[in-house]
Amino acid sequence: MNLYIESSAILSWLFGESTASEVISIIDKSEKIFTSVLSIVEVKRAIIRAEDQKLINISEKHKLLNLFETIKDEWLLFEITKEIRDLASEKFPLEPVRSLDAIHLATVIKGLHISNDLKLLSFDDRIIKNANLLGITLANT
């Protein structure tokens, strides 16, 4: 199985949320892991916000950032190309869709052209609902 991991799943794993073990299990079963460069920004921003909001300390922030840097280097990254921007600008089955979510959905659609067995791992309800309506297979079902 090839996997597109969306930022909500990455953050669940990094922050040790209740679904973290599910994320690890799915990652371990995956041949290739894809994500968007957008996920890099979203994950790093979330870690910085967590430290700023005193949810983690500076040492934990650095540990999480280092862990993420190490693991993401093994993943295949999609740039936000014109084709992805154009797809993200179209209407989705279940609106409204936030711009960043639209970029993730468009990236998965593009990814399916490269790997037809690509599955999506996300914990974001808006993304999951649209993925289902678009016929995108979820990894966490």
Image: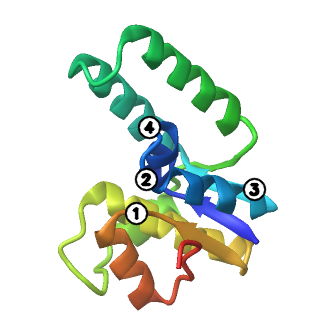
Q: Which residue is mark 2?
A: 18
Q: Secondary structure at mark 4?
A: loop
Residue 56 rendering spot, x and y as whole percentages: 34, 21
Mark number, residue 15: 4
Q: Amino acid type of disc 1?
A: Phe
Distance from disc 3 to disc 2, alpha carbons, whole Å, reads 17 Å
The residue that appears at 42% across and 47% down in the rendered structure is: 17
Taking the spot 20% from the left edge, 22% from the top edge, the residue there is 53
Amino acid found under the numbered disc labelled 2:
Ser
Q: Which mark is residue 28?
A: 3
Which x, y percent locates residue 5?
56, 57
Per the image, the residue denoted by label 1 is: 123
Outermost residue toward the top in this view: 59
Please state, as top left, top right, bottom left or bottom right, where the N terminus lies in the image. Answer: bottom right
Element type at mark 2: loop
Q: Nearer the viewer, mark 1 or mark 2?
A: 2
The answer to whether residue 91 is left or right of residue 84 is left
Mark nearer the N terminus (3 vs 2): 2
Disc nearer the start of the sequence (3/4) = 4
